[in-house]
Image (tube, rainbow, N blue to C red):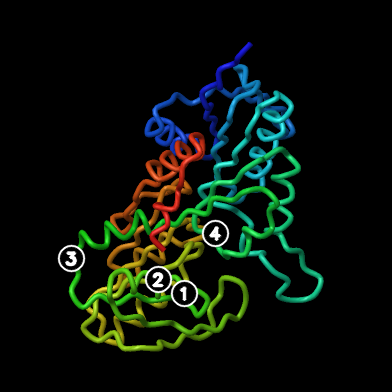
Amino acid sequence: MSYSVPDPKIFACTQSQVLATEIAKAFGAELGEVAFTRYSDGEFQPSFEESIRGARVFIIGSTNPSSENLMEMLLMLDAAKRASARHITAVMPYFGWARQDRKDKPRVPIGAKLVAKLLEAAGATRIITMDLHADQIQGFFEKPVDHLFASTIFLPYLESLNLDNLTMASPDMGGSKRAYAYSKFLESDVVICYKQRKAANIIGHMELIGEVTNKNVVLVDDMVDTAGTLTKAADLMIEKGAKSVRAITTHALLSGNAYEKIEKSKLTELIVTDSIPIRQQSDKIKVLSCANLFADVMHRVHHNTSISSKFLM
């Protein structure tokens, strides 16, 4: 007796409902139904409202704080495992807690490693994510990780701007590799900002390495949180004679008074993806969708075909 392989099923965590709907539409499927039971103390319980036995399941959800987003992903993975899903893929457009990728001082956790182990223990058999804060986080997993790059989204947009005297920039030394990768593709110059922090999210001093006079500068980073680094770098570059300064950042956390900083800064435009929902609209913020990228990779994963064409760099 032969059995047919069930079609894949796609489900969404609540924080990524809008993006997941777009991904499912691009994939050519409907989002599966998930019901949530919520208790008065804040505890919640997800429940798949359809059979997933033997199916390939994609669970879409970014794990940006609060920690409820991560907990929701873990509970849904566990529910899928206990419902006898055959393959369980955690689709995490933004992999939260990734800044804790090493011990940078004594007596601190390696949060990214902990999250990786939690995801695997909960039942994830594969991870699909985009622009990790540090590439080595892939090594924290014993399961396959498809690490996608938002360059496949940003580069066509940058090319459509037809900017002359284009120069790519990194807001810190750690992001220089990313800036050089973009510059190689676009055949542009590179400048780097050197910064010293007083504390987390607080910049004490910043210097510019390179020439930006009469250049259209594009800053590249994986995330923007308080926007302190990007706005300070943009203002510095304009002071040094840049014609314009834009920034491309994959994950728009935009916490605290980040929106206010962006509005007051010399940034011409902040270009982000919808890996995290934007809380506030701004004329300076351009949102590019990552739905087609994830839908295409999910389709390739389901049909066991190569995804290497999605790695422009």
Q: Which disc is residue 132 wearing? A: 4
| Residue matched to label 2 | 181
- Residue 172's spot in the image, x, y percent? 48, 78
- Residue 137 falls in image quadrant: bottom right
Please tell me which residue is depicted at 48% across the width and 48% down the height of the picture: 276
Please tell me which residue is depicted at 61% across the width and 18% down the height of the picture: 49
Give the mark nearer the N terminus: 3 vs 1.
Answer: 3
Q: CA distance from mark 3 to mark 2?
A: 19 Å
Mark 3 is surrounded, within 10 Å at the Cα level, by few (under 14), some (14 to 19) or many (20 or more) other residues, namely few
Residue type at numbered disc 4: Leu
Q: CA distance from mark 3 to mark 4?
A: 28 Å
- Residue 198 falls in image quadrant: bottom right
Mark 2 is surrounded, within 10 Å at the Cα level, by few (under 14), some (14 to 19) or many (20 or more) other residues, namely some
| Residue matched to label 1 | 177
- Residue 127's spot in the image, x, y percent? 59, 46
Please tell me which residue is depicted at 72% across the width and 27% down the height of the picture: 39
| Residue matched to label 3 | 162
- Residue 142's spot in the image, x, y percent? 70, 51
Give the mark nearer the N terminus: 1 vs 4.
Answer: 4
Residue type at numbered disc 1: Lys
Residue type at numbered disc 2: Ala
